[in-house]
Amino acid sequence: MKIYRAHDYKDMSRKAANIISAQIIMKPTCVLGLATGSSPIGIYEQLVDWYRKDDLDFSRVKTVNLDEYRGLSADNDQSYRYFMDKYLFSKVNIKNKNIHIPDGSNEDAEDECRKYEELIDSMNGIDLQLLGLGPNGHIGFNEPADCFTRRTHLVDLTESTIEANKRFFEDASQVPRQAYTMGIGTIMKARKILMVVEGEKKAEILKKALTEEVTPWVPASILQLHPDFTLVADDAALSLMNI
Ligand code: GLP
């Protein structure tokens, strides 16, 4: 595990964007696993900036996103597809055919999850997976549970996740109750994993995830076992860890 300390959100975003940028430069045909939430927004802004300066080329990059709310179609402004278009895809030269996000409007969960796993396999897996950290230790939408779920699946969101994500909606009642998410096995198969964590509010769960036992009750704790895992976090998020 490599840990890089950043002073603040901007520094964290720039350091993480550097790692993603290096991946794209070293392998222009790479498969990037992408994430949503507030944590990665600064990274996307930095990547867009470098693209505009002609330092990055997304024309052969392929992407697979971690998750999507079930019941929201791509044009719904609360969908993760909409989020990704807004912050990254509409601003760089990525090809639409190379963008992949679970289809939240597919009501057939078995069909959607199977297709998503097959898709990732057909691309020969993920080169670099970007992750945020949920306040309850979730990654993607893999919620705390009594076992890890290996493959892409339909998940019932916990109350704490609905509460944490309601800031993006008018109120908690608008937050979808279910989502499609890559499984823990899907994420762990990525050749590199890059996690970004910011703020004092995540300090405790971050410490738990990375320094205590590996348990499905803290899904991110599995990352301790990944052979190429990098964390970029700010001082506040690292404040309870002795590093
Ligand atoms: C959502 C996403 C996660 C993300 C988490 C943290 O629940 N499904 O992938 O990591 O939020 O978001 P934030 O970065 O806004 O704290």
Image: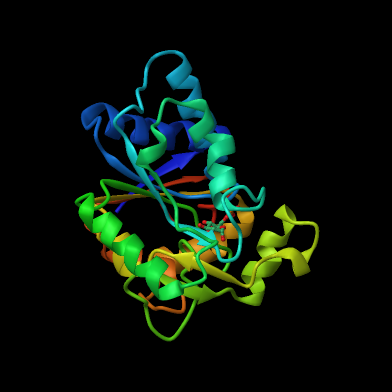
Left or right: 233 with respect to 121?
right
Q: Count the marks: how many?
A: 0
Residue 12 drawn at (x, y percent): 49, 38
Residue in the image at 69% along x and 65% along y = 175
Residue 231 drawn at (x, y percent): 39, 49
In the image as oriented, which residue stretches furthest toward the left? 124
Q: Quadrant of ligand 1?
A: bottom right
Residue in the image at 60% along x and 65% along y = 71
Residue 152 seen in the figure: no
Q: Is residue 178 above or below residue 28?
A: below
Residue in the image at 29% along x and 54% along y = 1
In the image as oriented, which residue stretches furthest toward the top? 53
Foreground residue, 193 or 82?
Answer: 82
Residue 205 seen in the figure: yes
Residue in the image at 23% along x and 49% along y = 123
Residue 44 drawn at (x, y percent): 50, 34
Left or right: 109 with respect to 149?
right
Foreground residue, 196 or 5?
Answer: 196
Which of the 4 quarters of the picture holds residue 22?
top left
Left or right: 97 with respect to 175?
left
In the image as oriented, which residue stretches furthest toward the right? 170
Q: How is the image coloured?
A: rainbow
Foreground residue, 60 or 233?
Answer: 60
Q: Is residue 20 above or below residue 126?
A: above
Q: Is residue 187 above or below residue 45?
A: below
Residue 222 drawn at (x, y percent): 34, 68
